[in-house]
Image (cartoon, rainbow, N blue to C red):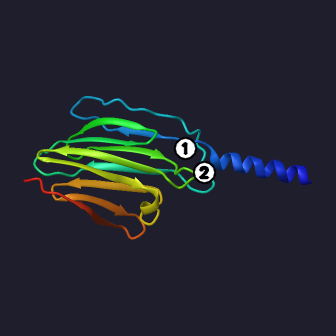
């Protein structure tokens, strides 16, 4: 009986600490397909935390293109060119240490901004599975999944 309990605890521990899977997808952009990197997560959900999806949408006016480069300490998604209405997204699980952090650099017209797009310390209060962002002419908006509303988190000015 004790042996079965120990084996169960070990199996659960190994499931919890498994390396987070990252899946990146990118919509087609202007007829060009941008390279995507996929790592199979074999369909398993973590026991402590489920899969999160970060989506960054170009919501600019007047055809303004966004050059977006997102990364973490371990993953570099390289620069993507986003036409209006297009997005970059990736899925992952928070690491066991609670230090998951992704940041992006955005270039659009006259604006160059670097910002945290996902920090587990902040985002656990506003998104459970869908961590959506919109880049607009006046700033970046983050979707609060629990309150079903958009919150402006960053400000800049890109003329229409």
Would you name the residue on which mark 2 appears?
Answer: 46
Q: Residue at (48%, 40%) from the top-left corner?
A: 22
Q: Is residue 134 above or below residue 125?
A: above
Element under label 2?
loop
Label number found at residue 20: 1
Q: Residue at (41%, 65%) from the top-left corner?
A: 126
Instruction: Determine whether, in the image, residue 62 is placed left or right of residue 7.
Output: left
Label number found at residue 129: none
In which image quadrant can residue 137 be found? bottom left
From this viewpoint, is residue 137 visible?
Answer: yes
Check the image and name the residue furthest to the left. Answer: 160
Q: Position of residue 154 (x, y in %)?
A: 25, 60
Element under label 1?
loop
Q: Quadrant of the N terminus?
A: bottom right
Q: Position of residue 125 (x, y in %)?
A: 45, 66
Instruction: Determine whether, in the image, residue 138 is placed left or right of residue 98.
Output: left
Q: Is residue 11 above or below residue 133?
A: above
The front one of 107 and 15 is: 107
Instruction: Determine whether, in the image, residue 57 is placed left or right of residue 97.
Output: left
The front one of 139 and 24 is: 139
User: What whole-number distance in Å separates the C-alpha atoms at marks 1 and 2?
Assistant: 9 Å
Check the image and name the residue furthest to the right. Answer: 1
Q: Residues within 10 Å of mark 1 (few under 14, many from 20)?
A: some
Marks 1 and 2 in Cβ contact (< 8 Å): yes
From this viewpoint, is residue 127 visible?
Answer: no
Q: Position of residue 153 (x, y in %)?
A: 28, 63
């Amino acid at each position: 009986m004790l042996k079965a309990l120990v084996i169960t605890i070990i199996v659960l521990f190994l499931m919890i600490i498994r390396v987070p899977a990252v899946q990146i997808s990118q919509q087609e952009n202007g007829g060009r397909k941008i390279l995507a990197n996929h790592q199979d997560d074999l369909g398993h959900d973590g026991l402590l935390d489920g899969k999160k999806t970060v989506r960054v949408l170009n919501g600019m006016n007047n055809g303004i293109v966004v050059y977006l480069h997102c990364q973490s300490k371990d993953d570099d998604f390289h620069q993507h060119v986003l036409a209006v209405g297009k997005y970059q997204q990736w899925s992952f699980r928070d690491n066991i240490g609670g230090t998951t952090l992704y940041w992006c650099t955005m270039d659009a017209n006259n604006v160059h901004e670097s910002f945290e797009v996902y920090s587990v310390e902040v985002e656990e209060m506003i998104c459970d599975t869908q961590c959506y962002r919109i880049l607009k002419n006046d700033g970046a908006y983050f979707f609060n999944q629990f309150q079903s509303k958009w919150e402006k988190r960053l400000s800049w000015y890109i003329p229409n």
